[in-house]
Image (tube, rainbow, N blue to C red):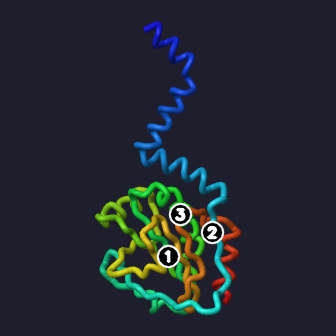
């Protein structure tokens, strides 16, 4: 016992770091907390791009929990904020509070549409994640193929379509969408 106590005193910092590392590896809430801290720095934020000279618009369909289909082509004339997530994805969980804040700020604006597309194998897991965290953003699931220009398999992925249906932002990885600088970029798209 005395040897163990002596070893812990000599290696206490290393022991704590190893325990934290193991916790980080096995606990998705610990991963999410660390990732939220990284997201809050703003280092990973994306930027809305200038309108490219020639970009084709994309079209795909999602549905809500009632089975009502929403087709992106039918949303032309609106700015469309698309976020792909899964409840098991720590980066998705880390960025989602900022997505909810963005939604709350613009949910009553008729010029913007939010498509939050859950990619859990079991849609109930995604719905439970939103309900548990009291997120009110619409819950949608894909009903067909999603074009590779929109989603290539990485989570989280965020895409913004302008009023003509062209991609103006495509960001893979977590970001903070609740910053004033992002709101200003979105406002510019709405005014176009």
State the residue at coordinates (40%, 85%): 60
Residue beneath disc 3:
173
Dot label at residue 82? 1
Badge 2: how crowded within 10 Å, few (<14), some, or many (20+)?
some
Q: Nearer the viewer, mark 3 or mark 1?
A: 3
From the viewer's side, name the closer residue of 185 and 20: 20
Q: Secondary structure at mark 1?
A: strand
Residue 67 image point, x, y percent = 30, 80
State the residue at coordinates (55%, 79%): 160
Query: Marks 1 and 2, how far apart in space?
Result: 14 Å
Q: Nearer the viewer, mark 1 or mark 2?
A: 2
Mark 1 and mark 2 lie on one chain; the one further toward the N terminus is 2
The answer to whether residue 70 is above or below residue 13 is below
Badge 1: how crowded within 10 Å, few (<14), some, or many (20+)?
many
State the residue at coordinates (60%, 67%): 177
State the residue at coordinates (53%, 32%): 17
Query: Marks 3 and 2, how far apart in space?
Result: 9 Å
> Which corner quadrant of the image does residue 163 belong to?
bottom right
Residue beneath disc 2:
46
Residue 154 falls left or right of residue 168: left
Locate the C terminus and report the quarter of the image it occupies: bottom right
Q: Can the viewer see residue 96 in this picture?
A: yes
Q: Secondary structure at mark 2?
A: loop
Q: Secondary structure at mark 3?
A: loop
Locate the N terminus and report the quarter of the image it occupies: top left
Mark 3 and mark 1 lie on one chain; the one further toward the N terminus is 1
**Could you tell me how many numbered marks the image carries?**
3
The answer to whether residue 47 is above or below residue 74 is above
Residue 182 falls left or right of residue 26: right
Residue 10 image point, x, y percent = 57, 17
Q: Residue furthest top?
A: 2
């Amino acid at each position: 016992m005395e040897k163990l106590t002596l070893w812990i005193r000599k290696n206490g910092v290393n022991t704590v770091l190893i325990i934290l590392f193991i916790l980080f590896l096995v606990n998705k809430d610990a991963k999410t907390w660390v990732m939220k801290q990284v997201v809050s720095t703003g280092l990973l934020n994306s930027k809305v791009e200038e309108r490219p000279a020639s970009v084709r618009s994309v079209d795909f369909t999602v549905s809500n929990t009632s089975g009502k289909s929403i087709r992106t082509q039918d949303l032309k004339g609106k700015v469309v904020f698309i976020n792909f997530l899964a409840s098991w994805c720590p980066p998705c969980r880390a960025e989602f509070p900022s997505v909810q804040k963005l939604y709350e700020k613009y949910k009553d604006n008729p010029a913007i549409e939010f498509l939050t597309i859950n990619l859990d194998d079991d849609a109930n897991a995604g719905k439970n994640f939103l309900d548990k965290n009291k997120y009110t953003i619409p819950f949608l699931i894909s009903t067909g193929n999603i074009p590779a220009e929109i989603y290539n398999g990485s989570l989280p992925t965020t895409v913004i379509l302008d009023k003509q249906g062209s991609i103006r932002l495509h960001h893979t990885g977590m970001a903070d969408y609740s910053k004033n600088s992002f709101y200003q970029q979105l406002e510019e798209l709405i005014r176009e």
